[in-house]
Amino acid sequence: MARALIFFLFLFGQLSVAQKFSIKGKIVDDKNAPLSFVNILLFEDSAQEPFTGTASEEEGIFAIHDLSEGQYQLEISTIGFKKQLFSLTLNKNIDLSTIVLEPSPEELEEALVTAKRPTVKKTAGMLVFTVENSSLSNGNTLDLLSKTPGVLVLGGKVTIKNRPTTIYINGRRVYLSASETTTFLQNLDASLIKQVEVMTNPSSQFDAESGTVLNIITAKTLTPGYKGTVSGTYEQAIFPKYNMGTAHFFKNNWLHLYGSYNMTPRKENKDQDSYIRFFETDGTTPAALWKSNFNRITKSLGHQGNLVADLDLDPKNSLNVTANFFTSPGEEYNNRQNTSILNAQMQLDSSFVTQSKVTSDMTNVSIGSEYKAKLNKEGELVIGGNFIGYGKDQYQALESNYFLGNGDFLKSIQFETNSHQDTQIWSGYLDLSMSLLQGTFETGVKYSNIDTKTGLDFFDIQNGAAQINTALSDSFDYKEDIYAAYANFSKEFKKWNFNLGTRMEYTDVNGVSGSLGNVNSQNYFKLFPSASLEYTWNLNNGMGLSYVRKIERPRYQSLNPFRYFLNENNFNEGNPNLIPAIEDKISLSYTYKNAWVFEIYYQTIENSLEILNLQDNEYFTFRQLDANLIDFFQFSFDAVYSASINDWWFASYVTSTYYLENEFFAVESPQERYSNHTAGFFAQAYNQFTLSEKGSITADLSARYISNLISGSLDYKNIFDLSFSFRKTFWNKTASVFVGMDDIFNTNNVAVTSRYLNQDNAYFARIETQKFRLGFQYQFGNASLRENKKTISTKEGDRLE
């Protein structure tokens, strides 16, 4: 801890440097289109090596500050364009205005991509983390996201500041459940990623359900030819895990073809200790204490494939066809739980041992097509449609054996369940963008149809014979139609930049239970406005104000009135009466030198969708219930710093100080409502070190700490992890190997408690977060190519679970 304190004191002590002179400009191509990520190097007069430099932003602008008076040489270069040199006499601030780079096709064919540092750009409502050709490009995309500023990967779930997050690939939404998304991202090669957009205030163009958005942008194509990649990763935790894949890309003047396949054999371990303190009817006198230890071993084999075809019909018209599949056949959970039941005097009364085996087969297939037409220089029409077919069959066999306190056998309980889910999602959309009033106007419409059928058959096993239990068996049919339209206008003028839009959605819902009848019938129309305003009064200072209103709809699995059992007294239960949650968020931000960003915001969520842990003190049962909270709100102050400390050290730091509070119905207590609240602190640090002159050896050090979080009735405290990795490239950077250690101190597991009124329960789950990783990647063919890897984007599919 002392070393860490000295490190941060040293770091921030280096940041106080007086400003002298600056050089700025804007870089465009021969068609006046801005060029981003162009290298700008500054040499002192007659020096052979640059002493500082930068890269152009998305709009092509760049600036170098804190320069002393003198003679300099400025070099501007990027792959595919002729290098430009400027001799400068610096005795005042210099504005080079617009710099036009001329194409250099012959250089493009021969160029080798060099390693770059990741960069961070923050605007009102969005942070852009550019990682292309950086050390973060090794490994998988889930590991990359865990190092992205402001992103939390907690228990395999990807969130932005612990709030529900929608994941997009190239602006198209991923339609998988949380666990399936995790596997998808583990299979997605990070070397294909150009940048990650972290949107806390997405515009009206995104679905109203997308409260926070991670938009993963893959690299663009450069030259014709063929390129292939083979890669593999080995992970060692308690059990070994593997990821093997290959990808192939071909491009000519009118056709882009991409295909990939990944296979992920995995064996995973989970241990969990828990207790439930049951009370008498007065809610305060202890009646019994149930203490359990649980172990789950999961075996799975995932197969993921992608096929993408982009056809350039002519210079203004193009067609895309995309197909993705993910399947996990024969996934197997082997569960064992030992429970001791102590009486009020803390003496052993009885015990039971539960063993259960769960097997499942899951398949998710997505097919989509999109047509784009350029109407003019700044206008574009997009028409597209998608289909998703999802199916899952699951079987569970459970047996509990009960024993008296002296160890004598008491009784045995056995049952089996068979469940299935079949979901079909159709969507069609039209988007139009054009120039209007010297700004950009975007509008569009969309229709989505969701039809999901689920069923569960419950069988009691007596004397080896199965008998159906109709009270615990059910079927559930859910249909949802969403009609949406949006309009969005953005404009830049002088020092101002503003965005104003709204989205309109009409939703028709009907849910029918075989045993309960019509349990969820809703029709509602909602408006979802969004607005942002930015003011930049000079190169070093800018401010932004934004507001957004969003919706979160219940996941399909959460609506099912079924039960998944850990044992006959402990189960997860869906809730067919769930309604959508409505979020409002307003934020104020300040940016300094494009390195520091400070943001304060206030967020409220009406009917927030959470999970409540509930114990029934009369019948000694425990369940996890999907529920709507009454409300949720938070205040937060965030600070982000991202810059190169020197020529071999890049750093990105994020901190958040917040207050969270929610209110929910105390379902199992006489008191009708209860409020849960906490103050907390979040810190995330990422450091990249270049350890060789040519950049062929790099190292990463990342850390994360969370003091307190709440989710419904649950409290989380003290989460910390530290990870480290090395990367080495070979053979003109066509091959690379990396080695790393995640969660070095094995501290990324956290105790979760729920204590209020007559509720007192807790668990401490230990999943395999501490992992040794070893991997390789080899590219063959034209290594300067960049893939057009895509996935199906619809808007409702990630509600699949």
Image: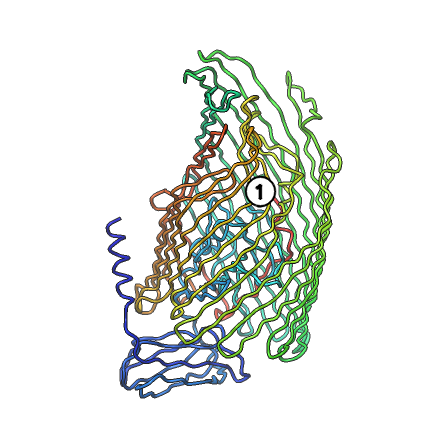
Q: How is the image coloured?
A: rainbow
Q: Residue at x 67, y 71 (%)?
A: 318
Question: Above or below — where is 630 with respect to 142?
Answer: above
Q: Nearer the viewer, residue 760 or 6?
A: 760
The image quadrant where one finds the C terminus is top right
**Whole-percent x and y of residue 355?**
53, 26
**Whole-percent x and y of residue 793?**
63, 58
Q: Residue at x 46, y 21 (%)?
A: 286
Tell me the kind of residue under disc 1. Ile
**Whole-percent x and y of residue 114?**
40, 70
Question: Above or below — where is 718 with respect to 588?
Answer: above
How many numbered marks are there? 1
Q: Nearer the viewer, residue 486 or 394?
A: 486
Q: Nearer the viewer, residue 716 or 36?
A: 716
**Whole-percent x and y of residue 287?**
48, 19
**Left or right: where does residue 680 sit relative to residue 226?**
left
Question: Above or below — where is 162 with respect to 287?
Answer: below
Residue 757 seen in the current view: yes
Q: Nearer the viewer, residue 307 or 349?
A: 349
**Left or right: where does residue 646 sit relative to residue 684?**
left
Within 10 Å of the Cα at label 1, are there few (<14), some (14-19), or many (20+) other Cα atoms?
A: some
Say which element carries label 1.
loop
Residue 732 seen in the current view: no
Question: Above or below — where is 207 with respect to 759?
Answer: below
Q: Which residue is mark 1?
A: 630
